[in-house]
Image: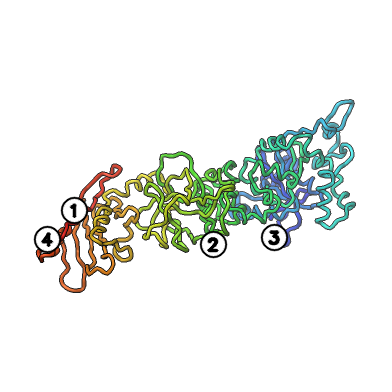
C-alpha cells in the first residue's frame, strides 16, 4: 500500500502489518486529477497547478491535524500504468477503506451554505474568505484561522476519536485544535430532515459506483462541502444517508453486517449508480460481496456476469436471481442479470431462512446447475412454464418469490417473463419427471439464441395424444426407464424436442396398470428425412415381440382383431411444424 506523508507529501510503500494508521479520501473524479507519475516526476510547483492537487493537500492537512501521519488518495497512490498493481488495488479497495483511521468524503458540488453564519472573518465591515490577504505556508494551510477554534460536531467527533485512541480529552484537543475551524459548523444549518436529504441527494458523490463501498466500509467518515467545511459525520447522518441510498442504517454503521443482507438487496444499492467504464460497475462491488476477480478492461458488461458467477461460488443465496428486466421483445433469457439496474426494485427483498439451507447450485459450462435437496425445487406454472422458488420475499408480504422457466429438452431451462417474479403459492406441485432431478438453467441467452430457442419445438414429436389414449387402455408412461433419448424429452409437454433436426430415433415405454398380465408396450418413433413413422413393440421374455403400427389381440371369441393403431399427424404450432402421434384404442369383445 502506497501512502502519502502528510507533512512532506512524499510517497512511501508499506506492506501487511507494517502499514501505519492512515486517513483516506473519498471523492468523485474531476478534471486535472494528479496521477502517480505526475506527483513523483513533476516539480512540486507544477503539480500544484492541477485542480486535483487541492484535494490531496487538504486531505493531508486534515489528517495531520487529527494526529495522523499518513494519508491515501486513489488518484496518486496507485500506479495505474501497472495492470498488476491496479488489479491488486481494486481487489483491496474495500479493505483499505475499512481499515482506515478516518475517511474524508469530499462533496465537490455541495454548496457551502454556512458563509452567512459567521464562519468567515469580517474585514473592513465585509465578510471575506480566510485566504484573502492572509499568508499561507507551502501546502496552502492558512496561518490565521477564523474565530474561536471548535472541534467537529460540538466536540463529539473529537471526544469519540480520543476515547478510541486512548488519549485524554486535553491531548486530543491539542491535536485537532489547529484544524477545528475547517471541521466545525452547525450540522443542519436550520434545515429540516427532508431538506437535508434533498440537499445531499443532489450531490454527484451519491450517484457514482465507487463511492458506494467508500460510504459503507469506513468506521469513521466525515462529509465536507465544496469549501472543505465539515457537514457532518456518517453515524450522525445515518437516517438521511439511509433514505438517499436505501442502505440499512445498521450496515452504514457496521460494515461487518454486510454478509447478513440478501444479495439482491445489496445489488439494489448500486442500481442507480454509474461508472465511467462499464467494467467498473462490477469491479466497484467486489468488496460489497466479499469476492475477488481479475481485472479485464475491455470486456465491457461481461465483468458483471463474472461478478455474479463469483458470488455464486461464495453464497447459496437464491435472491441473486430475483432481478427483473425492462420491457423487451426477447422471449428467452439467462438466469444472470445484465446490470445492477435490473435489481432496482429489490431493496425490500428478505430471505426466509439462512441461505446455507437452500438447494445447491453451481456454475458449469452447461449453465447454472441446480441440485435439489428435495422434490420441491420446481413447480408447474402457467403457459407451459415451470417456477423456481428463490426462497425470499418482500418486506410486508408473505409470498414466496420465484422466477418463470421454460424447458428445452430433458434438463435445460431458460428464464421467461423476466419482467415479473412468480408467486410460488399460485403454482402446482412439481411433476414426477422433475422431482429431485438435477437440472440446468442457461446463464446467458443472446437475442439470436432466444429466436432459435423459440423454435426448439420445430419438427418436435408430441406424444401427449398417445399418452392420454393409452391411459384408456390401462397403460401408464414409465418415466424411470422408458424414455430414450432422455436428453430430448420435455416432460411437461410430453414431447421429444428435435431442435429442428430431420433425423431422430426415439421410443417411450408404457407399463400396464396394477397387476395386469399385459406385457410392457413400447411406442417407437423414427424420424427420417423429415418424415415420421410410429409403431408399437410389445415387450416380454417369451416369444417374438409383436411389432407394427397396428397391434392385434384376440377377442372374447378367440378371433384376432385390431386393438391399437398408431397414427402420425403433422400440425403447425406457433408457426413451426410438429408431429403428433395419436393412438386409436379399438374395443375388444
Image quadrant holding the N terminus, namely: bottom right
Foreground tag (3 vs 4): 4
Residue at disc 4, secondary structure = strand
Element carrying mark 3: loop
Distance between mark 1 and mark 3 Cα atoms: 78 Å
User: Which comes before the other along the chain, label 1 or label 2?
Assistant: 2
Q: Residues within 10 Å of mark 4 (few under 14, many from 20)?
A: some
Lower sequence index among marks 1 and 3: 3
**Residue for badge 1:** 567
Q: Which mark is residue 357?
A: 2
Please tell me in which quadrant of the rendered image residue 51 appears: top right
Q: Nearer the viewer, mark 1 or mark 3?
A: 1
Q: Is residue 335 visible?
A: yes
Q: Secondary structure at mark 2?
A: helix
Residue 168: x percent and y percent?
88, 55
Residue indicated by mark 4 = 561
Q: CA distance from mark 2 to mark 3?
A: 39 Å
Amino acid at each position: 500500500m502506497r501512502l502519502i506523508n502528510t507533512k512532506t507529501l512524499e510517497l512511501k510503500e508499506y506492506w501487511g502489518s507494517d502499514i501505519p494508521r492512515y486517513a483516506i479520501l473519498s471523492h468523485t473524479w474531476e478534471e486535472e486529477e494528479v496521477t502517480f507519475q505526475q506527483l513523483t516526476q513533476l516539480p512540486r510547483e507544477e503539480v500544484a497547478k492541477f485542480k486535483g492537487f487541492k484535494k490531496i493537500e487538504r486531505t493531508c492537512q486534515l489528517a495531520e491535524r487529527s494526529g495522523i501521519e499518513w494519508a491515501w488518495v486513489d488518484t496518486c497512490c496507485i500506479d495505474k500504468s501497472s495492470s498488476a498493481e491496479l488489479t491488486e488495488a481494486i481487489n483491496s479497495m474495500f479493505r483499505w477503506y475499512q481499515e482506515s483511521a478516518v475517511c474524508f468524503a469530499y462533496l465537490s458540488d455541495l454548496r457551502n451554505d454556512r458563509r452567512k453564519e459567521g464562519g468567515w472573518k469580517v474585514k473592513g465591515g465585509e465578510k471575506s474568505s480566510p485566504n484573502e490577504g492572509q499568508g499561507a505556508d507551502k501546502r496552502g494551510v492558512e496561518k490565521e484561522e477564523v474565530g474561536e477554534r471548535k472541534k467537529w460536531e460540538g466536540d463529539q467527533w473529537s471526544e469519540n476519536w480520543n476515547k478510541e485512541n486512548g488519549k485524554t480529552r486535553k491531548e486530543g484537543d491539542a491535536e485537532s485544535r489547529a484544524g477545528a475551524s475547517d471541521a466545525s459548523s452547525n450540522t443542519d444549518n436550520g434545515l429540516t430532515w427532508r431538506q437535508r436529504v434533498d440537499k445531499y441527494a443532489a450531490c454527484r458523490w451519491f450517484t457514482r459506483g465507487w463511492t458506494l463501498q467508500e460510504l459503507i466500509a469506513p468506521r469513521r467518515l466525515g462529509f465536507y462541502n465544496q469549501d472543505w467545511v465539515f457537514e457532518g459525520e456518517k453515524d450522525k447522518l445515518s437516517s438521511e444517508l439511509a433514505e438517499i441510498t436505501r442502505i440499512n442504517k445498521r450496515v452504514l454503521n457496521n460494515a461487518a453486517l454486510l454478509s447478513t443482507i440478501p444479495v439482491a438487496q445489496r445489488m439494489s444499492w448500486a442500481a442507480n449508480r454509474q461508472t465511467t467504464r462499464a467494467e467498473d460497475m462490477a469491479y466497484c462491488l467486489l468488496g460489497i460481496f466479499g469476492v475477488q476477480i481479475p481485472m479485464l478492461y475491455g470486456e465491457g458488461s461481461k465483468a458483471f456476469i463474472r461478478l455474479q458467477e463469483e458470488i455464486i461460488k461464495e453464497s447459496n443465496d437464491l435472491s441473486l436471481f430475483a432481478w427483473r428486466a425492462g420491457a423487451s421483445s426477447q422471449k428467452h433469457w439467462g438466469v444472470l442479470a445484465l446490470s445492477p439496474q435490473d435489481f432496482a426494485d429489490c431493496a425490500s427483498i428478505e430471505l426466509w431462512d439462512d441461505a446455507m439451507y437452500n438447494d445447491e447450485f453451481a456454475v458449469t459450462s452447461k449453465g447454472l446447475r441446480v441440485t435439489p435437496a428435495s422434490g420441491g425445487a420446481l413447480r408447474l406454472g402457467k403457459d407451459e412454464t415451470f417456477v423456481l422458488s428463490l426462497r425470499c420475499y418482500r418486506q410486508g408480504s408473505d409470498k414466496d418469490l420465484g422466477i418463470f422457466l421454460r424447458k428445452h429438452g430433458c434438463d435445460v431451462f431458460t428464464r421467461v417473463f423476466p419482467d415479473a417474479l412468480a408467486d410460488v403459492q399460485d403454482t402446482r406441485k412439481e411433476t414426477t419427471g422433475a422431482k429431485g432431478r438435477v437440472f440446468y438453467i442457461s446463464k446467458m441467452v443472446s437475442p439470436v439464441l432466444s429466436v432459435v430457442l423459440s423454435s426448439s419445438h420445430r419438427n418436435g414429436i408430441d406424444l401427449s395424444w398417445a399418452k392420454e389414449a393409452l391411459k384408456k387402455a390401462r397403460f401408464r408412461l414409465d418415466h424411470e426407464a422408458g424414455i430414450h433419448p432422455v436428453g430430448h424429452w420435455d416432460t411437461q409437454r410430453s414431447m421429444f424436442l428435435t431442435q429442428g433436426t430431420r433425423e431422430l430415433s426415439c421410443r417411450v415405454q408404457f407399463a400396464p396398470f396394477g397387476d395386469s398380465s399385459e406385457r410392457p408396450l413400447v411406442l417407437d418413433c423414427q424420424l427420417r428425412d423429415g418424415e415420421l413413422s410410429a409403431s408399437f413393440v410389445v415387450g416380454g421374455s417369451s416369444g417374438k415381440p409383436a411389432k407394427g403400427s397396428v397391434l392385434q389381440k384376440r377377442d372374447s371369441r378367440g378371433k384376432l382383431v385390431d386393438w391399437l393403431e398408431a397414427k402420425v399427424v403433422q400440425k403447425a404450432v406457433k408457426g413451426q411444424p410438429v408431429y403428433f402421434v395419436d393412438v386409436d384404442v379399438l374395443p375388444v369383445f
